[in-house]
Amino acid sequence: MDMQVPKKKLGLKERYTLMTRDLAWDTSYQPKEKVYPYADYEGIKIHDWDKWEDPFRLTMDAYWKYQAEKERKLYAIIDAYSQSNGHLGVTDARYLNAIKIFLTAVTPLEYMAHRGFAHAGRAFPGPGARVACMMQAIDEMRHAQTQIHSLSNYNKYYNGFHDAPHMYDRVWYLSVPKSFFDDAITAGPFEFIVSVGFSFEYVLTNLLFVPFVSGAAYNGDMGTMTFGFSAQSDEARHMTLGLECIKFILEQDPANLPIVQRWIDKWTWRGVRLLSIVAMMMDYMLPKRVMSWKEAWEIYFEENGGALFKDLARYGIRMPDCCEQIRQEKDHLSHQVWAAFYNYSAATDFHTWMPDEDEMKWLSQKYPDTFDQHYRPRFEFWREQQQKGNRFYNKTLPMLCQTCQIPMLFTEPGDPTKICYRERDYKGSKYHFCSDHCQHIFDNEPEKYVQAWLPVHQIYQGNCFPEGSDPTAPGFDPLAAVLEHYRLNAGRDNGDFEGSEDQRNFEAWRGMAKRND
Amino acid sequence: MQVAAVKEYAGTPRDGVENFHGNQLLYIGWDDHLMFCAPLTFPFPPTLRFGDIVEKVLPGAYGYHPDWARVDWSKVEWLKSGQPWTPHFNRTLAENGLGHKDVLRFRTPGLTGIQGSCS
Ligand SMILES: [Fe+2]
Ligand SMILES: [Fe+2]
């Protein structure tokens, strides 16, 4: 006789267990080391993966439902924004240059984060960590997609938005974010999760997203604001995962501590160097400022990050060594980086400009100890020259740091008048660095960083010209050839904002939207 | 540890001198003139006369600066890898002992940039 057992509705915890950990099995045809070949080589010791606490009990079916709802809202807003010519509502066309950098420098990183988490999810032997990484991998793919979809609206009207993935692999300044993420995904799964899941997502992501999303809101950019908020609920999950990972690794074996500390030191520094571009966006590129870079740094890194490291002290983790230098640099960073992009504005997919007098006043007020003394004279000189039709462009390629790949624009700690030079010999060759911290990163793994693809050196090796060009031909113009290789439209995408097509079009279109002629 | 890797691993340096078509790299920075945001990178043949750099190349790179015309080359102080160094203008880079990826800085006493701001 058949007994019909009524189906019992599963509790959340039971359901979660069945749909995650219960899907895992121990291999029997192949030894575990062969199935998980990347689990041990970094030196991290894990004794019991079952001790992994799942930070959020999310199952795949619930995940889809939840994300689908967010997508519906997001695309409804993007549609409304584009149908109502929302782009004409931004404060000023200068603002769009910050968004160009976002699309070329940040969106490709979302995609790389997707790849990294997919790889870490495959590589970790523990099912709890695997599921969490898989979901984050899907989140990151979604972030890349939603950003491309929202920002493609601007590509219809403005220059420089047309070929982000192509530029990401080639344009000189984009080698900075690219090398950051390439470094992370070519590390083992544990270093990856500490670099991106913890150091970046937990410690630094607020400095990217909060000012950026608030910056978009302040400057009337509904599209960017919307994808920002849509991603933010994922970020909360990612941050929890990053923190859980660190704690889990540290609790598993005391020998893990020095390795994790070295990674935190390294990735905090690499992250801070990467964010120097965000510093300049906040202080120079948002027509309506949210707060200064220095203020954001104090709130999100010094206060919030400080509290976090206090919390981790019970595991033996201390603040990274680089924090002292970072504290000194916060008064200089945005000005130095903006000056560098102003130097090389002929070779970027976005425009630069000198701040007007009101903006300089704001900078003096936000940076009372440094701006007037070190930066105002330079910027006023450049502004005068530009107004006389003698706009400054640096025509010689800069020297780059072997590790962070940023031009050597940072000054000596304690002396903002001198460039900081560091060098070391390795196997008979010289390598140069912007700082002690970039040099230490190299020193720990020279065999990795000797391979750095430094854009300036690549140009001089002849590797950045269009296929078939002959650099020895008479009249060969190397800069034009490099820009063509970048797929950058010289005279439209690059150079000063003053007099640019973007500036003219924005003014004309906005005029049309307001007038009846 | 030279690199964290699953097996024996050696990287191939990407910037060996053999990749530069007969040139070697020389980095040059002008101290106290941060209008030029970073030191510059130049590809030069080792047979180039050092004086040609100063006389023919650097004016194109630095001539925009109002201080450039005031540089007194008899008073310029050079640093190589941060150490005092004296170039021979009539000798080549190789004869001056300059190798691939060497870094030079020059100081121009009395010249401290726009309004003395080291710009
Ligand atoms: Fe993301
Ligand atoms: Fe660096």
Image: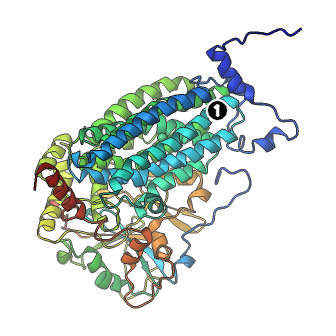
State the scheme by which the image is colored: rainbow
Residue at left 38%, top 44%? A325
Residue B94's x, y, as percent?
47, 83
User: Around disc 1, counting alpha carbons within 10 Å, would you say few (fewer than 14), some (14 to 19), or many (20 or more)?
Assistant: many
Residue A290, above or below B47: above
Between A391 and A57, the residue placed more toward the observer is: A57
Residue A189's x, y, as percent?
64, 42
Q: Quick one: quadrant of the C terminus of chain A?
A: bottom left
Residue A82's x, y, as percent?
32, 46
Residue at left 61%, top 37%? A134
Question: Which amino acid type corresponds to the residue marked 1 in the rendered image?
Answer: Val
Between A263 and A411, the residue placed more toward the observer is: A263
Between A402 and B104, the residue placed more toward the observer is: A402
In the rendered image, which residue does mark 1 sit on? A131
Q: Is residue A247 visible?
A: no
Residue A365's x, y, as percent?
16, 41
Query: What secondary structure is marked by label 1?
Result: helix
B68 horizontally vs A430: left or right? left
Residue at left 70%, top 31%? A126
Which of the 4 quarters of the picture holds residue B74?
A: bottom left
Mark 1 belongs to which subunit?
A: A
Quick one: which residue is furthest to the front in this view?
Answer: A1
Residue A475, above or below A367: below
Between A17 and A452, the residue placed more toward the observer is: A17
Q: Is residue A468 visible?
A: yes
Which of the 4 quarters of the picture holds residue A158?
A: bottom left
